[in-house]
Image (tube, rainbow, N blue to C red):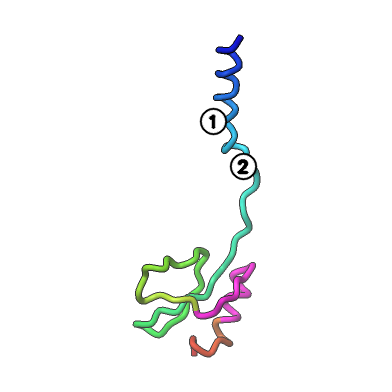
């Protein structure tokens, strides 16, 4: 009986992380400034902090690509 209980507990511990994220997160878009080319672009992933030439042009997070592309036209660092 102890062996069955230990196996059951072990199975539940190993299976737990599989239930942690049931839905996929919403997409987010960012405006990134390339300091070498002085151009802004819209990306769907946050740039890595170790990348020397890429930086966020703004701290805003956009829900759609269209919103982000509109923001590129109005942001001061991008013009």
Q: Residue at x 55, y 24 (%)?
A: 10
Q: Are marks 1 and 2 in contact (CB under 8 Å)?
A: no
Pinpoint residue 51: horizontal percent, then vertical percent: 37, 70
Q: Nearer the viewer, residue 67 or 47?
A: 47
Pinpoint residue 55: horizontal percent, then vertical percent: 44, 76
Pinpoint residue 6: horizontal percent, then vertical percent: 56, 18
Would you call the spot at circle 2 few (<14 residues within 10 Å), some (14-19), or many (20 or more)? few
Q: Nearer the viewer, residue 69 or 12?
A: 12
61 sits to left or right of 40? right
50 sits to left or right of 75? left
**Magenta-drawn stretch contains 68:** yes
Pinpoint residue 31: horizontal percent, then vertical percent: 52, 75
Q: Nearer the viewer, residue 15 or 10?
A: 10
Classify mark 2: helix, strand or loop: loop
Would you call the spot at circle 1 few (<14 residues within 10 Å), some (14-19), or many (20 or more)? few
Q: Is residue 52 above or below residue 46?
A: below
Give the residue number, with chain letter if any, for mark 2.
Answer: 20
Q: Is residue 14 above or below residue 6?
A: below
Q: Residue at x 50, y 68 (%)?
A: 43
Q: Nearer the viewer, residue 49 or 47?
A: 49
Q: Name the quadrant of the N terminus.
A: top right
Where, by quadrant of the figure, is residue 20 drawn? top right
Please report the bounds of the magenta region as a residue range.
57-71
Q: Residue 63 bears which disc, if any? A: none
Give the residue number, with chain letter if any, for mark 1.
Answer: 14
Classify mark 1: helix, strand or loop: helix
Q: Residue at x 61, y 73 (%)?
A: 66
């Amino acid at each position: 009986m102890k062996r069955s209980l230990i196996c059951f507990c072990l199975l539940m511990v190993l299976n737990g992380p599989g239930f942690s994220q049931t839905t996929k997160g919403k997409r987010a878009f960012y405006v990134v400034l390339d300091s070498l080319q002085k151009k802004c672009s819209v990306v769907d992933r946050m740039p890595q902090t170790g990348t020397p030439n890429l930086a966020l042009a703004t701290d805003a997070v956009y829900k759609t690509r269209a919103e982000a592309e509109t923001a590129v036209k109005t942001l001061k660092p991008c013009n």
